[in-house]
Image (spheres, rainbow, N blue to C red):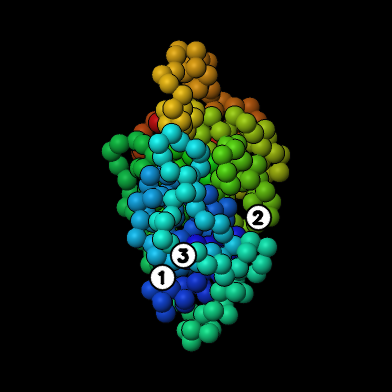
Amino acid sequence: MLLRGEALQTSGLEAAGRIAAATGCRLLCDTFAPRIDRGAGRVTLERIPYFAEQIVEFLGELEQLILVGAKPPVAFFAYPNKPSWCLPPDCKILCLAQDFEDGPEALARLAEDLGQPAKPARLQPLVRPGRPSGKFNAFTIGAAIAHLMPEGAIISDDGATSSGGTLQATVGAPAHTHLALIGGAIGQGLPLAVGAAVACPDRKVICLTGDGSGMYTLQALWTMAREKLDVTTVVFANRSYRILNVELGRVGAGEPGPAALSMLDLSNPTINWAGLGRDLGVEATKAETIEEFIDQFEDAMKGRGPRLIEALI
Protein backbone atom coordinates (compact mmCIF):
# COMPACT_ATOMS: atom_id res chain seq x y z
CA MET A 1 0.00 0.00 0.00
CA LEU A 2 1.47 3.35 -1.12
CA LEU A 3 0.40 6.32 1.02
CA ARG A 4 0.68 10.04 0.38
CA GLY A 5 -0.83 13.31 1.62
CA GLU A 6 -3.07 13.27 4.68
CA ALA A 7 -2.87 9.48 4.80
CA LEU A 8 0.67 9.93 6.19
CA GLN A 9 -0.54 11.95 9.17
CA THR A 10 -1.36 10.23 12.44
CA SER A 11 -5.02 9.25 11.91
CA GLY A 12 -4.37 7.89 8.43
CA LEU A 13 -1.29 6.00 9.53
CA GLU A 14 -3.12 4.39 12.43
CA ALA A 15 -5.84 3.12 10.09
CA ALA A 16 -3.20 1.89 7.62
CA GLY A 17 -1.46 0.11 10.49
CA ARG A 18 -4.68 -1.68 11.35
CA ILE A 19 -5.02 -2.82 7.73
CA ALA A 20 -1.40 -4.02 7.67
CA ALA A 21 -1.99 -6.01 10.86
CA ALA A 22 -4.96 -7.75 9.22
CA THR A 23 -3.44 -8.40 5.81
CA GLY A 24 0.34 -8.42 6.26
CA CYS A 25 0.74 -5.80 3.52
CA ARG A 26 3.72 -3.46 3.35
CA LEU A 27 3.12 0.23 4.02
CA LEU A 28 5.10 2.46 1.65
CA CYS A 29 5.54 6.18 1.05
CA ASP A 30 7.14 8.21 -1.72
CA THR A 31 10.77 9.28 -1.60
CA PHE A 32 9.59 12.88 -1.33
CA ALA A 33 6.48 12.46 0.81
CA PRO A 34 5.82 16.08 1.87
CA ARG A 35 4.78 15.37 5.48
CA ILE A 36 5.02 12.26 7.64
CA ASP A 37 4.18 11.81 11.32
CA ARG A 38 6.85 9.30 12.37
CA GLY A 39 8.95 8.05 15.27
CA ALA A 40 8.20 6.15 18.49
CA GLY A 41 4.56 5.16 18.90
CA ARG A 42 3.78 5.74 15.24
CA VAL A 43 3.17 3.25 12.45
CA THR A 44 6.42 2.48 10.64
CA LEU A 45 6.66 3.08 6.89
CA GLU A 46 9.06 1.95 4.19
CA ARG A 47 10.26 4.89 2.10
CA ILE A 48 10.74 4.18 -1.61
CA PRO A 49 14.39 4.77 -2.64
CA TYR A 50 15.44 7.62 -4.91
CA PHE A 51 17.34 6.03 -7.82
CA ALA A 52 15.44 4.06 -10.45
CA GLU A 53 17.47 0.86 -10.17
CA GLN A 54 17.00 0.90 -6.39
CA ILE A 55 13.23 1.29 -6.79
CA VAL A 56 13.09 -1.65 -9.20
CA GLU A 57 14.90 -3.86 -6.69
CA PHE A 58 12.87 -2.53 -3.73
CA LEU A 59 9.55 -3.31 -5.44
CA GLY A 60 10.76 -6.35 -7.37
CA GLU A 61 8.47 -8.92 -5.69
CA LEU A 62 5.37 -6.73 -5.53
CA GLU A 63 2.23 -8.41 -6.88
CA GLN A 64 -0.33 -5.74 -6.06
CA LEU A 65 -0.09 -2.03 -5.23
CA ILE A 66 -2.92 -0.11 -3.56
CA LEU A 67 -2.71 3.66 -3.94
CA VAL A 68 -3.98 6.04 -1.24
CA GLY A 69 -3.60 9.63 -2.44
CA ALA A 70 -0.56 8.53 -4.43
CA LYS A 71 0.53 7.69 -7.96
CA PRO A 72 2.60 4.72 -9.16
CA PRO A 73 6.32 5.24 -8.52
CA VAL A 74 8.48 6.28 -11.46
CA ALA A 75 12.10 7.39 -11.85
CA PHE A 76 12.82 11.01 -10.94
CA PHE A 77 14.75 11.67 -14.17
CA ALA A 78 14.95 9.90 -17.53
CA TYR A 79 18.32 8.21 -17.12
CA PRO A 80 19.99 6.50 -20.10
CA ASN A 81 19.67 2.71 -19.94
CA LYS A 82 17.63 2.92 -16.73
CA PRO A 83 13.89 2.20 -16.40
CA SER A 84 11.38 4.99 -15.85
CA TRP A 85 8.49 2.68 -14.91
CA CYS A 86 9.68 0.91 -11.79
CA LEU A 87 6.93 -1.59 -10.94
CA PRO A 88 7.09 -5.26 -11.98
CA PRO A 89 5.27 -5.72 -15.31
CA ASP A 90 2.64 -8.02 -13.80
CA CYS A 91 1.95 -5.90 -10.71
CA LYS A 92 -1.77 -5.10 -10.35
CA ILE A 93 -2.56 -1.48 -9.40
CA LEU A 94 -5.67 -0.59 -7.38
CA CYS A 95 -6.77 2.81 -6.09
CA LEU A 96 -8.41 3.14 -2.69
CA ALA A 97 -8.49 6.97 -2.74
CA GLN A 98 -7.43 9.65 -5.23
CA ASP A 99 -5.28 12.57 -4.08
CA PHE A 100 -8.35 14.84 -3.98
CA GLU A 101 -10.34 12.37 -1.86
CA ASP A 102 -10.30 11.68 1.90
CA GLY A 103 -7.54 9.09 2.24
CA PRO A 104 -7.70 8.73 6.05
CA GLU A 105 -11.47 8.17 5.92
CA ALA A 106 -11.08 5.53 3.19
CA LEU A 107 -8.42 3.76 5.25
CA ALA A 108 -10.54 3.92 8.42
CA ARG A 109 -13.54 2.39 6.63
CA LEU A 110 -11.44 -0.41 5.16
CA ALA A 111 -9.90 -1.16 8.56
CA GLU A 112 -13.39 -1.30 10.07
CA ASP A 113 -14.58 -3.64 7.31
CA LEU A 114 -11.62 -5.90 8.12
CA GLY A 115 -12.74 -6.04 11.76
CA GLN A 116 -9.52 -4.65 13.18
CA PRO A 117 -9.25 -3.11 16.68
CA ALA A 118 -9.18 0.66 17.11
CA LYS A 119 -5.39 0.83 17.42
CA PRO A 120 -2.75 -0.66 15.10
CA ALA A 121 -0.87 -3.66 16.41
CA ARG A 122 2.55 -2.74 15.02
CA LEU A 123 4.02 0.51 16.30
CA GLN A 124 7.58 1.80 16.17
CA PRO A 125 9.37 1.37 19.53
CA LEU A 126 11.53 4.13 20.97
CA VAL A 127 15.09 3.48 19.74
CA ARG A 128 17.50 6.36 20.22
CA PRO A 129 21.07 6.02 18.95
CA GLY A 130 23.78 6.35 21.54
CA ARG A 131 25.92 9.46 21.79
CA PRO A 132 28.11 9.24 18.65
CA SER A 133 31.85 9.73 18.55
CA GLY A 134 34.69 9.38 16.05
CA LYS A 135 34.04 10.36 12.45
CA PHE A 136 32.30 13.65 11.64
CA ASN A 137 29.92 13.04 8.77
CA ALA A 138 26.25 13.07 7.84
CA PHE A 139 25.61 9.79 9.68
CA THR A 140 27.17 10.72 13.02
CA ILE A 141 25.44 14.10 12.80
CA GLY A 142 22.15 12.28 12.19
CA ALA A 143 22.80 10.04 15.20
CA ALA A 144 23.50 13.10 17.36
CA ILE A 145 20.25 14.75 16.25
CA ALA A 146 18.25 11.58 16.96
CA HIS A 147 20.00 11.22 20.34
CA LEU A 148 19.07 14.74 21.46
CA MET A 149 15.87 15.83 19.68
CA PRO A 150 12.80 16.34 21.87
CA GLU A 151 9.40 14.75 21.43
CA GLY A 152 7.10 16.69 19.12
CA ALA A 153 9.89 18.23 17.06
CA ILE A 154 9.34 19.23 13.44
CA ILE A 155 12.14 18.46 10.98
CA SER A 156 12.28 20.64 7.86
CA ASP A 157 14.52 18.58 5.61
CA ASP A 158 16.22 20.20 2.62
CA GLY A 159 19.54 18.42 3.03
CA ALA A 160 19.38 16.26 -0.13
CA THR A 161 22.57 14.15 -0.11
CA SER A 162 23.48 14.97 3.52
CA SER A 163 20.23 14.47 5.45
CA GLY A 164 19.85 10.75 4.76
CA GLY A 165 21.82 9.96 7.90
CA THR A 166 19.33 11.90 10.01
CA LEU A 167 16.36 10.26 8.30
CA GLN A 168 17.84 6.84 9.02
CA ALA A 169 18.76 7.61 12.63
CA THR A 170 15.40 9.15 13.60
CA VAL A 171 13.18 6.20 12.64
CA GLY A 172 12.78 5.32 16.34
CA ALA A 173 13.33 8.80 17.79
CA PRO A 174 10.57 10.42 19.88
CA ALA A 175 7.41 11.13 17.88
CA HIS A 176 7.96 13.97 15.42
CA THR A 177 6.87 15.37 12.05
CA HIS A 178 9.15 15.16 9.02
CA LEU A 179 8.71 17.72 6.24
CA ALA A 180 10.62 16.67 3.13
CA LEU A 181 11.49 18.09 -0.25
CA ILE A 182 8.43 17.93 -2.49
CA GLY A 183 10.42 17.67 -5.70
CA GLY A 184 13.71 18.62 -7.26
CA ALA A 185 13.65 22.30 -6.31
CA ILE A 186 16.11 22.65 -3.44
CA GLY A 187 15.90 25.75 -1.27
CA GLN A 188 12.63 25.17 0.58
CA GLY A 189 14.15 24.09 3.91
CA LEU A 190 14.71 27.48 5.56
CA PRO A 191 11.38 29.16 4.63
CA LEU A 192 9.50 25.93 5.38
CA ALA A 193 11.07 25.96 8.85
CA VAL A 194 9.87 29.54 9.29
CA GLY A 195 6.32 28.51 8.41
CA ALA A 196 6.44 25.50 10.75
CA ALA A 197 7.70 27.63 13.65
CA VAL A 198 5.00 30.26 13.11
CA ALA A 199 2.28 27.59 12.87
CA CYS A 200 3.54 25.56 15.87
CA PRO A 201 5.35 27.90 18.29
CA ASP A 202 5.27 25.28 21.05
CA ARG A 203 7.27 22.73 19.00
CA LYS A 204 11.01 22.70 18.40
CA VAL A 205 11.81 23.07 14.69
CA ILE A 206 15.00 21.53 13.30
CA CYS A 207 15.99 22.65 9.80
CA LEU A 208 18.40 20.48 7.81
CA THR A 209 19.84 22.22 4.78
CA GLY A 210 22.96 22.26 2.62
CA ASP A 211 25.32 25.10 1.84
CA GLY A 212 24.06 24.96 -1.75
CA SER A 213 20.31 24.70 -1.13
CA GLY A 214 20.41 27.20 1.72
CA MET A 215 21.83 29.92 -0.53
CA TYR A 216 18.53 30.11 -2.44
CA THR A 217 16.58 31.36 0.58
CA LEU A 218 19.07 32.51 3.23
CA GLN A 219 16.95 35.62 3.92
CA ALA A 220 14.71 33.29 5.98
CA LEU A 221 17.39 33.49 8.70
CA TRP A 222 16.64 37.21 9.06
CA THR A 223 12.95 36.39 9.49
CA MET A 224 13.80 33.80 12.17
CA ALA A 225 15.77 36.45 14.06
CA ARG A 226 13.16 39.19 13.60
CA GLU A 227 10.31 36.97 14.79
CA LYS A 228 12.41 35.16 17.44
CA LEU A 229 11.40 31.78 16.03
CA ASP A 230 12.50 28.60 17.78
CA VAL A 231 14.37 27.08 14.84
CA THR A 232 17.71 25.28 14.99
CA THR A 233 19.28 25.20 11.52
CA VAL A 234 21.99 22.68 10.66
CA VAL A 235 23.90 23.62 7.50
CA PHE A 236 25.77 20.66 5.98
CA ALA A 237 28.72 22.54 4.48
CA ASN A 238 30.37 20.26 1.92
CA ARG A 239 31.36 23.16 -0.39
CA SER A 240 29.54 21.61 -3.33
CA TYR A 241 26.19 21.19 -5.03
CA ARG A 242 26.64 17.50 -4.32
CA ILE A 243 23.26 16.30 -5.59
CA LEU A 244 23.81 18.10 -8.92
CA ASN A 245 27.22 16.47 -9.26
CA VAL A 246 25.57 13.09 -8.72
CA GLU A 247 22.87 13.76 -11.31
CA LEU A 248 25.38 15.13 -13.82
CA GLY A 249 27.19 11.82 -13.66
CA ARG A 250 24.00 9.81 -14.16
CA VAL A 251 22.22 11.58 -17.03
CA GLY A 252 24.76 10.63 -19.67
CA ALA A 253 26.03 14.14 -20.38
CA GLY A 254 29.56 12.92 -21.07
CA GLU A 255 32.73 13.83 -19.19
CA PRO A 256 32.24 17.33 -17.70
CA GLY A 257 35.09 19.79 -18.15
CA PRO A 258 36.52 22.28 -15.65
CA ALA A 259 34.03 25.00 -16.56
CA ALA A 260 31.03 22.71 -15.99
CA LEU A 261 32.42 21.39 -12.71
CA SER A 262 33.18 24.89 -11.46
CA MET A 263 29.49 25.78 -11.71
CA LEU A 264 28.75 23.14 -9.05
CA ASP A 265 31.61 24.15 -6.75
CA LEU A 266 30.98 26.29 -3.65
CA SER A 267 34.57 26.81 -2.49
CA ASN A 268 35.47 29.85 -4.60
CA PRO A 269 34.77 31.92 -2.61
CA THR A 270 34.01 29.86 0.50
CA ILE A 271 30.68 30.72 2.13
CA ASN A 272 30.91 31.53 5.83
CA TRP A 273 27.52 30.31 7.03
CA ALA A 274 28.18 31.02 10.69
CA GLY A 275 29.11 34.58 9.74
CA LEU A 276 26.03 34.96 7.56
CA GLY A 277 23.85 33.73 10.39
CA ARG A 278 25.30 36.20 12.87
CA ASP A 279 25.01 39.07 10.38
CA LEU A 280 21.32 38.23 9.95
CA GLY A 281 20.73 38.18 13.70
CA VAL A 282 20.90 34.45 14.41
CA GLU A 283 23.21 32.98 17.05
CA ALA A 284 25.58 30.87 14.95
CA THR A 285 28.53 28.54 15.49
CA LYS A 286 30.78 26.21 13.50
CA ALA A 287 31.39 22.52 14.22
CA GLU A 288 34.36 20.60 12.82
CA THR A 289 34.12 17.51 15.05
CA ILE A 290 31.20 15.40 16.23
CA GLU A 291 31.97 16.42 19.82
CA GLU A 292 31.66 20.11 18.92
CA PHE A 293 28.43 19.44 17.08
CA ILE A 294 26.89 17.53 19.98
CA ASP A 295 27.71 20.32 22.45
CA GLN A 296 26.27 22.99 20.16
CA PHE A 297 23.15 21.03 19.20
CA GLU A 298 22.45 20.02 22.80
CA ASP A 299 22.67 23.65 23.86
CA ALA A 300 20.25 24.62 21.08
CA MET A 301 17.75 21.94 22.14
CA LYS A 302 17.80 23.21 25.73
CA GLY A 303 17.23 26.85 24.77
CA ARG A 304 14.74 28.73 22.64
CA GLY A 305 15.11 31.03 19.70
CA PRO A 306 16.93 30.85 16.37
CA ARG A 307 20.25 29.00 16.21
CA LEU A 308 22.52 27.96 13.35
CA ILE A 309 25.24 25.31 13.32
CA GLU A 310 27.54 25.16 10.33
CA ALA A 311 28.68 21.54 10.13
CA LEU A 312 31.95 21.50 8.15
CA ILE A 313 31.76 18.04 6.63
How many numbered discs sit on the rendered protein? Answer: 3
Mark 3 and mark 1 residues within 8 Å of each other at the beta carbon: no
Q: Is residue 196 left or right of residue 57?
A: right
Considering only order in the chain, which callout, 1 or 2, is on the residue closer to the N terminus?
Answer: 1
Q: Residue at x 69, y 51 (%)?
A: 198
Q: Residue at x 59, y 62 (%)?
A: 69
Residue 305 image offset from top left, x and y in percent: 61, 45
Q: Name which quarter of the figure residue 246 lies in.
A: top left
Considering only order in the chain, which callout, 3 or 2, is on the residue closer to the N terminus?
Answer: 3
User: How far is mark 2 from mark 1, CA to CA?
Assistant: 37 Å
Q: Is residue 309 above or below residue 100?
A: above
Residue 226 image offset from top left, x and y in percent: 71, 39
Along the line of sight, the residue nearer the viewer: 110 or 124? 110
User: How far is mark 2 from mark 3, CA to CA?
Assistant: 44 Å
Circle 1 residue: 25
Q: Is residue 223 left or right of residue 245?
A: right
Circle 2 residue: 201
User: Does residue 188 appear in this view?
Assistant: yes
Q: Is residue 71 above or below residue 63?
A: above
Q: Is residue 92 above or below residue 109?
A: above
Q: For the residue labelled by badge 1, is the local secondary structure a helix, a strand or a loop?
A: loop
- How many neighbours does mark 2 have within 10 angstroms: few (below 14), some (14-19), or many (20 or more)? few
Residue 312 image offset from top left, x and y in percent: 43, 29
Q: For the residue labelled by badge 3, is the local secondary structure a helix, a strand or a loop?
A: strand
Circle 3 residue: 92
Along the line of sight, the residue nearer the viewer: 135 or 295? 135
Q: Quadrant of the C terminus?
A: top left
Q: Residue at x 71, y 43 (%)?
A: 227
Along the line of sight, the residue nearer the viewer: 7 or 88? 88
| Residue type for callout 3 | Lys
Q: Nearer the viewer, mark 3 or mark 1?
A: 3
| Residue type for callout 1 | Cys
